Image: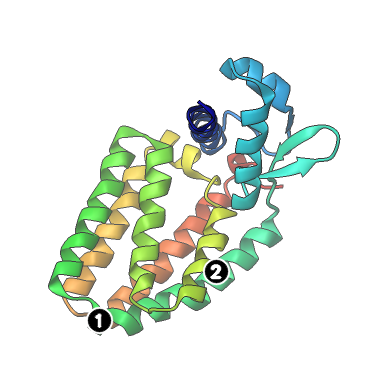
């Protein structure tokens, strides 16, 4: 019975975590606002404990911060923070993807195209949570050809701190599908064995992402 109870607790924690993550990415939970575990628990119809545990998972992902004696605050990223993260991604991702191209086999290209197609599919549906996860998987799969685990960990961490910015605005402006299609263009350049174009597309893609963060409604402060 104890094991069953433990598994059920973990399941509630995961379900609450998914709901919270979706609320943050969709903009339903606003940056800078403090949310208490008891009040969120009442919203979800669960106790405060799984909410608190789920929030701590999101703290580790960089989506929320602990507000001592109050609850949890959705992370606020300033313009300088976003500039620094973009600079790091531009230094790391485009040249590395160009360098690893010879390691990408035809079967790997098929996988990358499938992953890129998933991103477009989720963009067309307007599912920001699924879009964010598919985008993360695609970029980290590309970087995995570097065989550098520290690199993957670093880029994953950088992305975790910014994935909530700009997507809702892109969807509202009808630009999310175009942003998603850029991943397919990257795959096409890999198929064409065009390293220079791959690097250029990666730089443009990351640069456009930073541009979307700079829109007034992204709430960057």
Q: Position of residue 141 (x, y in %)?
A: 34, 65
**First in residue order: circle 2 vs circle 1:** 1
Q: Which of 25 and 84 lies nearest the eye of the viewer?
A: 25
Instruction: Say which residue appears at 57% left-offset and 19% top-offset.
Output: 44
Q: Which of 188 and 15 lies nearest the eye of the viewer?
A: 15
Residue 206 vertical placement versus 23 (above, below): below
Kind of element beneath mark 1: helix
Q: Quadrant of residue 34?
A: top right
In the image, taking residue 39 as reference, residue 190 lies left or right, namely: left
Q: Residue furthest left?
A: 106
Q: Which of 45 and 218 lies nearest the eye of the viewer?
A: 45
Task: Please name the residue that numbered disc 1 is placed on.
Answer: 103
Instruction: Say which residue appears at 26% left-offset and 47% top-offset.
Output: 118
Instruction: Say which residue appears at 23% left-offset and 76% top-offset.
Output: 104
Q: Position of residue 160 (x, y in %)?
A: 55, 54
Which scheme is used to colour this image of the protein?
A: rainbow
Residue 209 vertical placement versus 198 (above, below): above
In the image, taking residue 129 as reference, residue 58 lies left or right, namely: right
Residue 179 vertical placement versus 173 (above, below): below
Q: Are marks 2 and 1 in contact (CB under 8 Å)?
A: no
Task: Please name the residue that numbered disc 2 is placed on.
Answer: 154
Kind of element beneath mark 2: helix
Q: Residue furthest right?
A: 69
Task: Determine crowd level at label 1: few under 14, some 14-19, many 20+ residues with C-alpha closer than 10 A.
Answer: few
In the image, taking residue 144 as reference, residue 80 lies left or right, namely: right
Instruction: Say which residue appears at 48% left-offset and 28% top-offset.
Output: 4
Task: Determine crowd level at label 2: few under 14, some 14-19, many 20+ residues with C-alpha closer than 10 A.
Answer: some
Q: Quadrant of residue 126?
A: top left
């Amino acid at each position: 019975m104890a094991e069953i109870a433990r598994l059920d607790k973990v399941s509630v924690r995961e379900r609450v975590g998914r709901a919270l993550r979706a609320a943050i990415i969709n903009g339903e939970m606003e940056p800078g606002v403090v949310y208490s575990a008891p009040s969120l628990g009442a919203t979800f119809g669960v106790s405060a404990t799984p909410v608190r545990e789920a929030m701590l998972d999101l703290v580790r992902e960089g989506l929320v911060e602990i507000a001592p004696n109050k609850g949890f605050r959705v992370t606020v990223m300033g313009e300088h923070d976003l500039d620094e993260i973009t600079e790091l991604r531009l230094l790391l991702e485009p040249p590395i993807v160009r360098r690893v191209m010879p390691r990408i086999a035809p079967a790997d290209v098929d996988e990358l195209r499938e992953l890129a197609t998933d991103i477009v599919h989720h963009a067309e549906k307007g599912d920001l949570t699924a879009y964010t996860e598919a985008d993360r998987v695609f970029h980290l799969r590309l970087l995995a050809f570097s065989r550098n685990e520290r690199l993957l960990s670093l880029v994953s961490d950088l992305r975790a701190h910014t994935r909530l910015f700009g997507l809702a605005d892109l969807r509202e402006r009808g630009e999310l599908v175009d942003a998603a299609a850029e991943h397919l263009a990257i795959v096409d350049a890999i198929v064409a064995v065009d390293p220079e174009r791959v690097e250029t597309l990666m730089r443009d893609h990351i640069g456009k992402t930073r541009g979307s963060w700079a829109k007034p409604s992204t709430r960057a402060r």
